[in-house]
Amino acid sequence: MEKTFQGKLGTYIVRETEDKSLTIWSGFFDENCHSLAGAINETIYNYLEGAEVLPKLTEGRPCSVFEVGFGAGIGPKLTINKWRELGAKAPLSFISTELDPALVEFVRDNSEEDFLKNLVRDENGHFVFKEGLLTFKILIGDARKTIKEFQKENHLIDSFYQDAFSPKKNPALWTVEWFEDLKIIAKDQAVLSTYSCSNAIRKSLVQAGWAVFNRKGFGTKRHATIAKSQGESSDEILLSLSRSPVVALVDQNL
Ligand SMILES: C[S@@+](CC[C@H](N)C(=O)[O-])C[C@H]1O[C@@H](n2cnc3c(N)ncnc32)[C@H](O)[C@@H]1O
């Protein structure tokens, strides 16, 4: 039977996906955190592979990840476990963001992983786990605000997991302003990966100064998007964006 719980934003339902891994449906956003085709496989494909984290962990290079939306915690779970499995040879920092602290508490209290079970809240209400070369932090609150504080820390990012709910349901995290904020904390060779291939979000990325590329989507999805903090977008993308009447998303509430 599906498990239901109450968060700060509303009701959540824990659901099994096709690869037997669990995802969480949010009543507030009326969407699942993952494709029902498989939460784990989707996360490996879209983020550990798409945002080029795996080569860094394999080669023992330092790696800093910024995740847009903690949700069910699958992103950090897979990344940190993979880092450990590959020998934890260099520092890993994993920064996530989450609007609903009750969701983080639910994941923490139902988790086997030490880095989730032992998360503690700091003086600003963010969740933190630090051990040796690992720093894991979940910034609590609207990411559009918490990123402004994070920018002051001068902590630059290699890989972005752009994993908000869909642009339709969660437009605030797909705007030109949002991608400009991500660019401020991006290293020169940073890579952003996302499951969305909408022309509107690709236009937002291009306007925010990212170079945009097409990638095959997970499972039956035809396309996904990669963006790089330096370089030029692919000609094919620029041509198709120039032919599309949709406009970039802008933040209405800033
Ligand atoms: C698709 S889920 C993320 C799934 C997650 N990456 C995982 O692997 O389990 C999106 C998450 O973004 C959070 N979110 C939505 N809007 C937000 C905002 N403005 N600031 C911070 N988090 C937000 C939602 O509450 C939700 O938990």
Image (cartoon, rainbow, N blue to C red):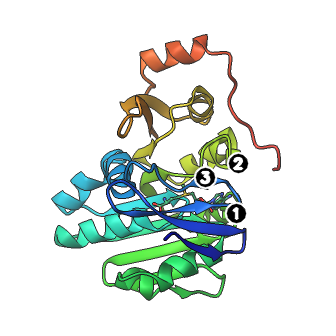
The numbered mark, 1 or 2, whose residue comes first in the sequence reads 1
Q: Does any atom of ligand 1 lie closer than 8 Å to the CB of label 2?
A: yes
Separation (CA) of disc 1 from disc 2: 10 Å
Q: Nearer the viewer, residue 246 or 191?
A: 246
Q: For the residue marked with disc 3, what is the amino acid?
A: Glu
At which x and y percent is residue 32? 55, 55
The residue that disc 1 covers is 142
| Residue 7: mark in rendering | none
Q: For the residue marked with disc 2, what is the amino acid?
A: Ala
Q: Secondary structure at mark 2?
A: helix
Q: Nearer the viewer, residue 7 or 68?
A: 7
The numbered mark, 2 or 3, whose residue comes first in the sequence reads 3
- C-beta proximity under 8 Å, tags 1 and 2: yes
Above or below, 188 against 78 in this view is: above
Q: Secondary structure at mark 1?
A: loop
At which x and y percent is residue 2? 51, 69
Local packing at callout 3 (Cα closer than 10 Å; few below 14, some 14-19, many 20+) is some
Q: Does any atom of ligand 1 lie closer than 8 Å to the CB of label 3?
A: yes
The residue that disc 3 covers is 31
The residue that disc 2 covers is 172
